[in-house]
Image: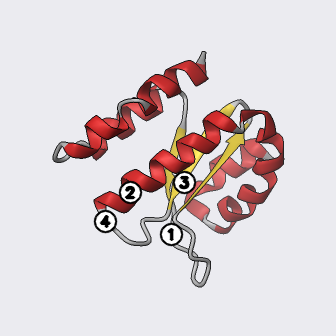
Amino acid sequence: MLQSRLQKLANKIARYSTLENRIHDFIKELKKTGVIFLIIPNLEKTYTDGSACWVNKNPVIALTGRYKRNDNFWFTLAHEIGHDLLHARLKALNTKRFIIILKASPEYAHLSATAS
């Protein structure tokens, strides 16, 4: 069910991305599907724009805002949603890698505690 809601929302990315000031509206809708959405600090020399994994039964999408441009935001968000939709069966493998980032950021400690 979560994946079908996420797929329906993913189909609306193009429309949202062409309208002004729709990022916050899209993020609200994304959270309603059950996705945990985070903006995390860019890690120096990693060249990472975003990451996707699963924590418990919820997909997590984290964006770094490395370029701080709308086009990069929408592309990276669509890319990470694609990972969550296409690789849901691999969710256990992706979680451990991402928890390291969460533990490095005190503001996300509550998420890493539930995922460990």
Q: Which residue is mark 3?
A: 62
| Amino acid tagged 1 | Pro
Q: CA distance from mark 2 to mark 1?
A: 14 Å
Percent across and percent down for residue 104 are 67, 68
Number of the label disc, if any, that sits on residue 73: 2
In contact (CB < 8 Å): disc 2 and disc 4? yes
User: As drawn, is 25 to the left or to the right of 45?
Assistant: left
Q: Secondary structure under badge 1? A: loop
Q: Which residue is mark 1?
A: 41
Number of the label disc, if any, that sits on residue 29: none
Badge 1 crowding class, 10 Å Cα cut-off, few under 14, some 14 to 19, many 20 or more, is few
Percent across and percent down for residue 64 are 49, 64
In contact (CB < 8 Å): disc 2 and disc 1? no
Residue lying furthest top: 1
Within the image, what quadrant is residue 12 found in? top left
| Amino acid tagged 4 | Arg
Within the image, what quadrant is residue 108 found in? bottom right
Q: Which residue is mark 4?
A: 69
- Upstream in the sequence, badge 3 or badge 1? 1
Q: Nearer the viewer, mark 1 or mark 4?
A: 4
Q: Nearer the viewer, mark 3 or mark 1?
A: 3
- At x 72%, y 34%, the residue is 88
Badge 4 crowding class, 10 Å Cα cut-off, few under 14, some 14 to 19, many 20 or more, is few
Q: Please tell me which residue lies in front, 51 or 83.
A: 83
Query: What colour scheme has been applied to the protein in the rendered image?
Result: secondary structure
Q: Secondary structure under badge 3? A: strand
Q: Nearer the viewer, mark 2 or mark 3?
A: 2
Q: CA distance from mark 2 to mark 3?
A: 11 Å
In contact (CB < 8 Å): disc 2 and disc 3? no
Within the image, what quadrant is residue 44 found in? bottom right
Residue lying furthest bottom: 45
